[in-house]
Image (cartoon, rainbow, N blue to C red):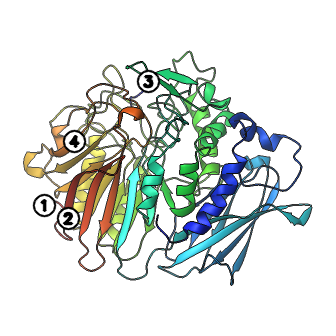
Amino acid sequence: MSRDSGNAIGRRTVLRGSAVASAALALPASAAAAAPALALSGRPQARWGAQVGDVTASSGLVWVRSDRRARMIVETSATDSFRRTRRWQGPLVGPGTDFTGRTALHGLPPGEQIHYRITLADPHDPRRTGEPIHGTFRTAPARRRDVRFLWSGDLAGQGWGINPDRGGFPIFSEMRRLDPDFFLCSGDSIYADNPIPPTVTLPDGRVWRNITTEEKSKVAETLKEYRGNFRYNLLDAHLRDFNAQVPSITQWDDHEVRNNWYPGQILDDDRYTEKNVDVLAARARRAWSEYFPVSTLRPDGAGRVYRVLRHGPLLDVFVLDMRTYRNANSPGRQPEDAVGILGAEQLAWLKRELSRSRAVWKVIASDMPLGLVVADGGTNYEAVGQGDPGAPLGRELQIAELLRHIKHRRITGTVWLTADVHYTSAQRYVPTRAAFTDFEPFWEFVSGPLHAGGFPAVGLDGTFGPEQAFVKAPAKPNVSPAEGGQYYGEVEIDGGSAELTVRLREEGGAVLFTKVLQPGRVGQ
């Protein structure tokens, strides 16, 4: 985007592992980040916590990072006592993946709480193991059952980093207490182009303090610097506790590379010595793939980000990639545009998978909004809408094709979720208000940031007829997290009625807006 500047289930197990990681990270941040490069004594340690991603009814992908070369071993159990376990031999982690490793778990029981522990073993002496790190997650149900998940995005942006005076990222503790089935990260999981200074003076004269590291002292360009950006966020204990209890579905957007990037871009930015964005994106993608458990990607970055995650008979989540295949940002007035924001291949995939879906609800996880006018400076536009309320042009043509397909194939239950713009809002798209009318009404919900600057609301593009039912945004740009304006969304699906409820929440627990959608009547 254009923004420069508890549950009781498994808590004892989760926090036991977190305490080990928290103690390890009591070192200075720079020392902790550099630890694998040193000749270390003792036993391997998992200083950066554990994560689980892309959980299905029978599988999950477990992640860990070691402080040295080690063998990753995972054990799973139905209880946190681990009296009966199943053992999984994971990879040998080393410098090729920045000491991160992932182990795929298969054959898990559906709809059950899974407890896991990760042990790191010395590759030369398997008896020398570090303290296990613990976590838990629920597999997707095989039958209709209540579903709850959260979504948001935008973490540690605009120079607002881990502030010890606020306890770091407290919003993650608040979200963890809601005990969701999973968390959908809608992009901007880091801000590789936003250095984090030691201090920032707030408008009222107070001083915001940041923990910072070598890699966060400049814009990221090298693979080492991108890796350090992802590692930085894991210095926060709230985030590590959250990751240990709540599995993730993660997508990327622009700030994982740099602001408003697109393939083929050549930078005019004095902060960068590497001007070719394709080179930067390849490095960033590799680091992103190493630091998140994404089932369709290898740790070297090969594969694809877009995918569908099936969460029982009530929910499919379609994760989009609006970065890798887009065309250049432009005024967006082209009468023909085969590439658009998704690329032809991804659009064909999305139409095909939506047609195949038998889930009651089909959440389209979009890393950018559809009808909000997000500019890229001057006369260029960053998202889909470009401010022209007339017939579809530019990237709107691709979205029009998708919406037409959804209507004509009688695909029901589509809901769009996104972040990106650093405020929260709800839009209903209505053909009777639109220039393009060949679609069924639908809702789009926006939430974020998690921990970044808040920004004023942008305008609406009338091509698809959005009417804004709710918006909350600051009046001035780059409002710090200390001043509020941090948001996340909650979705609940009732296992009996299949009714879907969306709540837009603000840090502190307040519910700002609620919308209840009935199956078969999503555009109501």
Taking the view exactly as shown, the residue that stands out farthest to the top is: 270
Report which quarter residue 425 is drawn in.
Answer: top left
Query: Can residue 413 be spotted in the picture?
Result: no
Asked whether the beta carbons under mark 1 and mark 3 sit within 8 Å of each other, the answer is no
Please tell me which of labels 3 and 2 falls first in the chain.
3
- Tell which tag, 1 or 3, sits nearer the viewer: 3
Q: Say few, some or many: other residues with alpha carbon within 10 Å of mark 3 (under 14 / 14 to 19 / 20 or more).
A: few
Residue 231 rendering spot, x and y as whole percentages: 64, 43
Please tell me which of labels 4 and 1 falls first in the chain.
4
Q: CA distance from mark 3 to mark 4?
A: 22 Å
Residue under label 2, please give it.
517
The amino acid type found where label 3 is placed reads Ser
Residue under label 3, please give it.
5
Q: Which mark is residue 355?
A: none
Label 4's element? strand
Asked whether the beta carbons under mark 4 and mark 1 sit within 8 Å of each other, the answer is no
Q: CA distance from mark 3 to mark 2?
A: 37 Å
Residue 210 rendering spot, x and y as whole percentages: 56, 30
Please tell me which of labels 1 and 2 falls first in the chain.
2
Residue under label 4, please give it.
471
The residue nearer to you, when weighing 161 against 308, is: 161
Horizontal side of 118 relative to 363 (left or right) equals right
Asked whether the beta carbons under mark 1 and mark 2 sit within 8 Å of each other, the answer is yes
Q: Please say if 448 is above or below 493.
A: above
The amino acid type found where label 1 is placed reads Gln
Residue under label 1, please give it.
524
- Tell which tag, 4 or 2, sits nearer the viewer: 4
The amino acid type found where label 4 is placed reads Val
Which residue corresponds to the image point at 31% horizontal and 33% vertical from the top-left? 374
Q: Say few, some or many: other residues with alpha carbon within 10 Å of mark 2 (under 14 / 14 to 19 / 20 or more).
A: some
Which residue corresponds to the image point at 50% horizontal and 35% vertical from the top-left? 263
Of the 4 image quadrants, the one containing the N terminus is: top left
